[in-house]
Image (cartoon, rainbow, N blue to C red):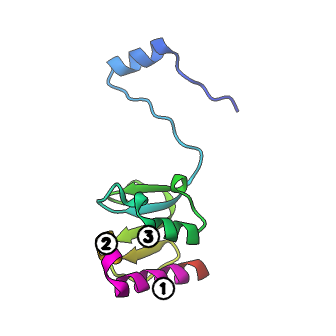
């Protein structure tokens, strides 16, 4: 299948009409991290969890809300709800880094998530 790409003239015309062009990624998002902290992927703890899930940063997106995001799995911070097939819930990163009980709950959730 051939993908049509607009030329510069067409892009300029679309821009004048107030239309923004987007390139849709072909690769599906494996994991959406739902957090207000956009720098969360830089955390060593998050990197450890991603390794356990056999994911890289390129497989993830950080969003403030899950609305409109299509991902295979979602990790929501600041909530303690049961693990489901598609959702993992944990404390906020700041809490996880300083509270061993919250970190233990996170790893138990990851373990359950991997077994589903």
Residue that badge 1 annotates: 108
- Quick check: can you spot residue 39? yes
Residue that badge 2 annotates: 92
Upstream in sequence: badge 3 or badge 2 = 3
Q: Nearer the viewer, mark 3 or mark 1?
A: 3
Span shown in magenta: 97-112
The one of 18 and 63 positioned closer to us in this rendering: 63
- What residue is drawn where x is 36% and y is 21%? 15
Gap between marks 3 and 1 measured at Cα: 14 Å
Q: Nearer the viewer, mark 3 or mark 2?
A: 3
Gap between marks 1 and 2 measured at Cα: 16 Å
| Residue 12's disc number | none
Q: Percent position (x, y) of residue 47?
A: 49, 65
Residue that badge 3 annotates: 45
Q: Give above or below for 96 relative to 33.
A: below
Gap between marks 3 and 2 measured at Cα: 12 Å
Magenta segment, principal secondary structure?
helix
The crowding category of the residue bearing disc 3, from other C-alpha atoms within 10 Å (few below 14, some 14 to 19, many at least 20), is: some
Badge 3 element: helix
For the residues bearing labels 3 and 2, Cβ distance under 8 angstroms = no
Q: Give above or below for 83 relative to 86.
A: below
Upstream in sequence: badge 1 or badge 2 = 2
- Quick check: can you spot residue 116? no
Badge 2 element: loop
Badge 1 element: helix
- What residue is drawn where x is 40% and y is 15%? 12
């Amino acid at each position: 299948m051939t993908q049509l790409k607009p030329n510069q003239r067409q892009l300029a015309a679309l821009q004048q009409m107030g239309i923004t062009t987007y390139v849709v990624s072909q690769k599906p998002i494996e994991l959406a991290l739902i957090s207000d902290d956009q720098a969360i992927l830089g955390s060593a703890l998050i990197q450890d969890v991603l390794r356990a899930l056999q994911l890289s940063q390129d497989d993830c997106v950080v969003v403030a809300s899950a609305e409109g995001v299509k991902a295979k799995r979602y990790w929501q911070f600041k909530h303690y709800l049961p693990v489901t097939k598609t959702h993992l819930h944990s404390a906020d990163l700041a809490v996880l880094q300083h509270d061993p009980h919250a970190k233990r709950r996170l790893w138990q959730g990851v373990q359950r998530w991997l077994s589903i």
